[in-house]
Amino acid sequence: MTTLFTLRAGRWLTVLLLLWLGGPQTASALDETLEQNYAEKLKKPFVSAISWESSLEKAKQQSAEKNLPIIAYFTRSYAP
Amino acid sequence: MEGGPLLTDWWKTSTKRFVPYLNISARLPEKPDQQMMTQYGLRGFPTFLILDSEGQILFGKEPYWRPDSPENLEAGLAEVETIFRLKKRVSENPQDQLAKAHLTLILGLLNPDQCSVAEMEAACKVEGVPAEVVGRWLRERSRIRFLEAFGPYRNAFSTGAEKEELARLRKTAMERAFTMVRDGESIGEDDADFRAFWVLAFDGAMEAKDRRVATRCLKTYTDAFGVADRFVKGMKERLGELPVQVE
């Protein structure tokens, strides 16, 4: 009985230790994944098909100069 | 969209008619314009909006718009290109009263709840303003007029206000709807408050003992919702009890 309890407690301690050690690394790994996703999104053919503005301020300037409307496309890279 | 319409020739060639702006939500704060979705009150992906040079939404939020075919793209651009043409005309000739009035009406109709009613009314009187735009404003004006009276009643109802307060607000809404029908005004059939408008107008007409208006309300209501509607029977009975007016 005591052995079983010790085994269970030891398992939980290991899990907690791994979580504690792995926490900061996981956040950093997540950022890295988000960066990769973003870079992959930018490589998609629809991005290079036309000349998109990536800053709304610049798009507004162009719109005023050319007297043209802005078509804004909102998409995401963090999920498919 | 990204693997289809946004790669087509019609999309690529159409970019001379607008400035394309790409906003990618990345959950990385240092990437460009990450706050824009929130700023524009957007919740879903993908979303397309047509904006003016101040970044104001001209089209695309409600109703939801997607330029996934040449026809849909054209429909969106057609909604806003008049604004840009008129703005150019006004900037080139500030004395162009027709262009100014037309522009006032179109921009006012984009935000009818915030526009100046006096300016819209003045713009309607300028000769040559398209009748279709004036018609749209007149319908919008009626909606605003009804909501002025109906909005407080609806809010009081949904927040569970006191019975007396509810009755007072309902009476105001009834009187407003009745007056509008009597004066030849009504709200559009596609309006979410269409049913409430005619029920209240009918009640207002009954209160005022105006059989002519009550009959008109009942007819419009029955035409729209059918004889089997839950209110129709009661309305008919009440109208039957109203004394016939001698003209």
Image (tube, coloured by chain):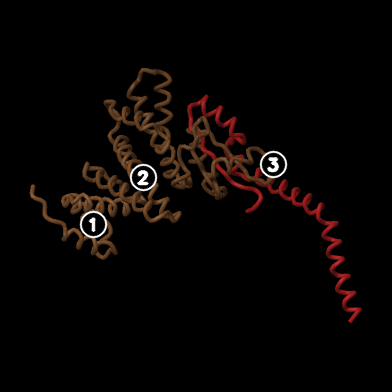
Chain colours: A red, B brown
Same-chain status of marks 3 and 2: yes
Question: Which residue is the site of mark 1?
Answer: B223
Task: Give the mark nearer the N terminus: 1 vs 3.
Answer: 3
Q: Nearer the viewer, mark 1 or mark 3?
A: 1
Q: Residues within 10 Å of mark 1 (few under 14, many from 20)?
A: few
For this rendering, which residue is in front, A53 or A47?
Answer: A53
The reply to whether the C-beta atoms of the residues labelled 1 and 3 are less than 8 Å apart is no
- The outermost residue toward the bottom is A1
Q: CA distance from mark 3 to mark 2?
A: 41 Å
Same-chain status of marks 2 and 1: yes
Tell me the element at label 3. Answer: loop
Q: CA distance from mark 2 to mark 1?
A: 23 Å
Image x and y of residue B24, in percent? 62, 43
Same-chain status of marks 1 and 3: yes
Q: Nearer the viewer, mark 2 or mark 1?
A: 2
Which amino acid is tagged 2? Leu
Q: Chain of mark 2?
A: B
Q: Is residue B171 above or below residue A10?
A: above
Q: Residues within 10 Å of mark 2 (few under 14, many from 20)?
A: some
Task: Give the mark nearer the N terminus: 3 vs 2.
Answer: 3
Residue at x-position 32% and y-position 35%: B133
Q: Is residue B179 above or below residue B127?
A: below
Question: Which residue is the site of mark 2?
Answer: B147
Image x and y of residue B43, in percent? 55, 49
Residue at x-position 62% and y-position 36%: A54
The reply to whether the C-beta atoms of the residues labelled 3 and 2 are less than 8 Å apart is no
Q: Residue B95 appears in which quarter of the rendering?
A: top left
Which amino acid is tagged 3? Pro
Task: Give the mark nearer the N terminus: 2 vs 1.
Answer: 2
Question: Which residue is the site of mark 3?
Answer: B29
Residue at x-position 38% and y-position 31%: B116
Q: CA distance from mark 1 to mark 3?
A: 55 Å
